[in-house]
Amino acid sequence: MPTKRSISPRTLSLLAIPFLLVGLAFFVMGIVASVVDWSRMQDWHPLEAQLLSAGLEQRGSRTRTWLATARYRYQFGGKTYIGQRVAINESADNIGDFQQTLGFRLRGAMRAGQSVQIWVNPQNPAEAVIDRSLRGSLMAYFSLFVVLFGGVGAGILIFARRTARARSAVAGGPDASA
């Protein structure tokens, strides 16, 4: 009678690693980086800046992702600076209408010759941003990947550990009492 082959707990543990790493990457580069930037921007100073350019770029060939863009000039401490950072997260996305709304607002201000409020880092005035809001929808999106990939990886590890204990118990090994 043929025996059923099963994957070893060690192989299962190795399979879990990529899932855990993807979950960890979304946590660190998505959530932690955004929260850290948002937190340090709370002490930045508001200033008025003159828009030099403003737009909304469509990225991607299959899915439509958007990126609000701008170049702006501002003065701080008697020096003139040029900034380009528009939001905390500097990537294009299609999470809600944040990028489109911001891009249209900046484009409208540019056409009307209006200045825009920016936030400037007093410790490093070359660092500035137009919108320093922490986007809940983007954090939820990152969290989905953290939970999904991290959860699958953790589930595989737990299953591998239980399988190893069960095999050890059947064989009467040292893990039988654990």
Image (cartoon, rainbow, N blue to C red):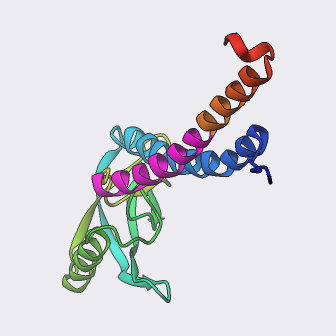
Residue 20 image point, x, y percent: 61, 45
Residue 14 image point, x, y percent: 75, 45
Relative horizontal placement of residue 145, taking residue 6 as reference (left or right): left
Residue at the far front in the pictured view = 1
Query: Which residue appears at 41% of the width and 85% of the height?
Result: 58
Query: Which residue appears at 66% of the width and 30% of the height?
Result: 161
Query: Which residue appears at 81% of the width and 17% of the height?
Result: 173
Most foreground residue, 13 or 105? 13
Magenta stretch prevailing secondary structure: helix
Whether residue 32 is situated above or below residue 19 in the rendered picture: above
Task: State the image quarter where residue 65 is shown.
Answer: bottom left
Magenta range is 136-156
Residue at the far top in the pictured view = 177
Residue 30 seen in the current view: no
Q: Quadrant of the C terminus?
A: top right
Most foreground residue, 101 or 141? 141
Most foreground residue, 129 or 164? 164
Most foreground residue, 131 or 81? 131
Task: State the image quarter where residue 118 is shown.
Answer: bottom left
Q: How many marks?
A: 0
Q: Is residue 148 magenta?
A: yes
Residue 49 seen in the current view: yes
Q: Is residue 95 magenta?
A: no
Residue 44 image point, x, y percent: 36, 43
Query: Which residue appears at 43% of the width and 83% of the height?
Result: 63
Residue 19 image point, x, y percent: 61, 50
